[in-house]
Amino acid sequence: MTPTTTTPAWEPPTAGDELGHLLGGLDRQRMTFRYKAEGLDAAALSATVGASTLTLGGLLKHLTWVEVSSATTKLDGSSPGSPWTEVEWDHDQTTWDFTSAAEDSPEELYARYDAAVLATRERIREALAAGGLDQGVEWFRPFGVEASLRRLLFDLLEEYARHTGHADLLRESIDGRVGEDPPEGWAPPAAWVAHDR
């Protein structure tokens, strides 16, 4: 990105602290992914590329699960709620979030994703205020391993980086939309912006 007089909402700080860069980088990935996935109908959300079965609808539902589990089960061991608690997450069901997305309407997929992002951002802010990046989280405790909130957030950022790349290829194959960042004038979902005020 070339610096301008107005910094877009998705641009992380250019000279911030560790927390500002980490959260800014995560939000940049979230907004870029949302831009790549936005405004599609059911057919487009179910489109695939080549031999892959991956779809933008599947990515929306998967990243909804990633957001929800990061803010509940991994963060403090709390329940992720429905529909996630009804899924049998055994060896044969590890792709449920990807494959079941075809049963959901575009409106459901977008609304659940947007709500999950808002909820996770809020829960992470609360956790950071209570104990900072070095505090332990529940994630690996059942296995006798201590993990920090910093590690959880980096994992969330890594998950987005991987899947935003997938979204790049899928979206380009659907309607030719390309680009590293959303274009000038693009805005994230209104609920995200209202929540930040």
Image: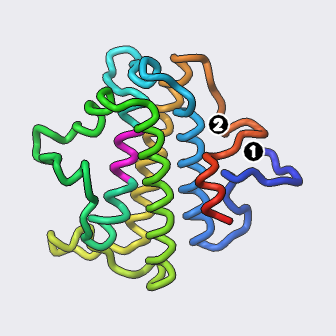
Instruction: Look at label 1 and name its amino acid.
Output: Met
Determine whether the residue tagged by mark 1 lies in a helix, strand or loop. Answer: loop
Q: x and y percent of residue 51 in the render?
A: 32, 16
* Quarter of the picture holding the C terminus: bottom right
Q: Give the range drawn in magenta.
A: 60-66
Question: In the picture provided, is 132 more to the left or to the right than 53?
Answer: right
Q: Looking at the image, which residue is at 24% across and 64% down?
A: 79
Q: x and y percent of residue 33 in the render?
A: 53, 40
Determine whether the residue tagged by mark 2 lies in a helix, strand or loop. Answer: loop
Cα distance, mark 1 to mark 2?
Answer: 9 Å
Q: x and y percent of residue 72 in the render?
A: 32, 65
Q: Looking at the image, which residue is at 35% across and 56% down?
A: 68
Question: In the picture provided, is 46 more to the left or to the right than 16?
Answer: left
Q: In which quarter of the image is residue 78?
A: bottom left
- How many numbered discs? 2
Residue annotated with mark 1: 1
Instruction: Look at label 2 and name its amino acid.
Output: Glu
Residue closer to the observer: 160 or 31: 31
Vertical side of 38 occupied by 79: above or below: below
Q: How crowded is mark 1: few (under 14 residues within 10 Å), some or many (20 or more)?
A: few
Q: Do the residues labelled 1 and 2 touch (CB within 8 Å)?
A: yes
Residue annotated with mark 2: 180
Q: Looking at the image, which residue is at 46% across and 85% down?
A: 130
Task: Indicate whether residue 93 is drawn in magenta.
Answer: no
Vertical side of 18 occupied by 93: above or below: above
Q: x and y percent of residue 115 in the render?
A: 46, 52
Q: Which colour scheme is used?
A: rainbow
Q: Quadrant of residue 178?
A: top right
The disc, 1 or 2, on the residue closer to the chain's N-terminal end is 1
Q: Looking at the image, which residue is at 38% across and 14% down?
A: 50
Question: In the picture provided, is 40 more to the left or to the right than 136?
Answer: right
The dot on residue 159 is none
